[in-house]
Amino acid sequence: MTDKPTFLPQRQIAATYMRGGTSKGVFFRLRDLPPECRVAGKARDQLLLRVIGSPDPYAVHIDGMGGATSSTSKCVIMSKSEQPNHDVDYLYGQIAIDKAFVDWSGNCGNLSTAAGAYAIHAGLVAPERVPQNGICSVRIWQANIGKTIIAHVPMINGRVQEMGDFELDGVTFPAAEIVLDFIDPSDSDDAGTSMFPTGNLVDQLEVPGLGMLDATMITAGIPTVFVNAEQIGYQGTELREDINNDVEALAKLEQIRIAGALRMGLIDRPEQAQQRQHTPKVAFISPAKNYTAASGKTINRDDIDLLVRALSMGKLHHAMMGTAAVAIATAAAVPGTLVNKAAGEGQRQSVRFGHPSGTLQVGATVEQIDGLWQAQCVTMSRSARILMEGIVRVPQNQTL
């Protein structure tokens, strides 16, 4: 008689499910994780994969907290900061849907909004720093990329104000506005070539099957490869289904991403791109045009500076990633980039771009120092709220 396996009860871990901007994720305090998961490694990755419900060959995340899109398959770990002059450390994991893989290579700009609000909710900000009413400026250390973000979170009667009349395209209901400042968002310390890793504002990028493409590659916010929509057969008005239901289109855009990753020095061989799915992003841009957003709203070309469509984890994003918005605004502020040209050229300190769900305005301050472009600060408004809080249950027996 064969012994039946012993099935352990599920682990119970304190967690909070939050929307931040146009993303959702499961938030944890570092101290609430099992001891073996409080440090980077296989145990932590397996835990987060099981929380989200990955890998899922059905790509629906029925057995987990994920939403089967790049925008909804995310986890965040937060703790009181170990960095001087910061309140909290914020670590972000992008969970692959169909693979047993957690990408720690970049930040999520949308969930940065929720990170500020969560830090206050979770008691991670010193009480003397939190006003009863007004604005609490939460100083966040983004641990994935080693950068500072300041989230200006509204407070009312000693609690985070979540409800309000701020509307964000890509989010159904209005909420309270949270302003984010991304301080010195470019990864320029090592390359010595400002935030353009090749040293050029525009490169010729050789892409298998497509030939030579013009490309602007930048590391502000998140490493991003910008190409002209028309040069790859698009208008820049495409919606999510137009791209995501086209296998050949996705393969073409992935080839651009791989070529950009190689040129930017993020990978050494094409096959390494599978282990770096979160970065770089690839985006195609176009001068402003009239189009109909996913909500059915008409976007008038006179109300925007340019069009941008960006991919995340191999799929066209339904709106815009926060980190990609940082890259867009920064590139738009530098005369000579493809983004700046699409936006009408010239000097600018803000840009409003059209994305599949509507529009977004982002401000950027850049400076040229010793001939090298540097980003000083990028500012945008988002919103966040708690969707659910309590205990997430995670099976112990099933391995990945």
Image (spheres, rainbow, N blue to C red):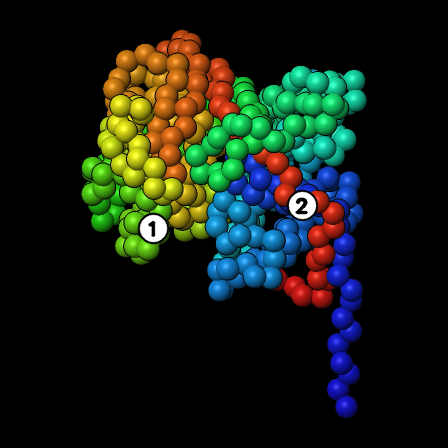
Q: Is residue 142 above or below residue 237?
A: above
Q: How many marks?
A: 2
Q: Residue furthest bottom?
A: 1
Q: Residue furthest front?
A: 165
Residue 184 is situated, as x and y percent measured from the top left of the image, at 51, 19
Few, some or many residues within 10 Å of mark 2 (<14, 14–19, 20+): few
Residue 309 is situated, as x and y percent measured from the top left of the image, at 34, 38
Horizontal relation, residue 98 to residue 283: left or right = right
Q: Is residue 220 above or below residue 249?
A: above
Image point 44% across, 47% down: which residue? 313
Question: Residue 388 versus residue 145: which sits nearer the camera?
Answer: 388
Few, some or many residues within 10 Å of mark 1 (<14, 14–19, 20+): few
For badge 2, the amino acid type reads: Met
Question: Residue 387 versus residue 47: which sits nearer the camera?
Answer: 387
Label annotation for residue 301:
none
Query: Residues under labels 1 and 2: Cα distance?
Result: 29 Å
Image point 69% across, 31% down: which residue? 119
Which residue is labeled 1 in the image?
241
The quarter of the image holding the C terminus is bottom right
Which residue is labeled 2 in the image?
388
Image point 58% across, 34% down: which residue? 384
Residue 163 is situated, as x and y percent measured from the top left of the image, at 61, 31
Question: Residue 362 versus residue 74: which sits nearer the camera?
Answer: 362
Image point 48% across, 15% down: which residue? 376
Residue 187 can be seen, yes or no: no
Residue 97 can be seen, yes or no: yes
Task: State which tag comes first along the sequence, 1 or 2.
Answer: 1
For badge 1, the amino acid type reads: Glu
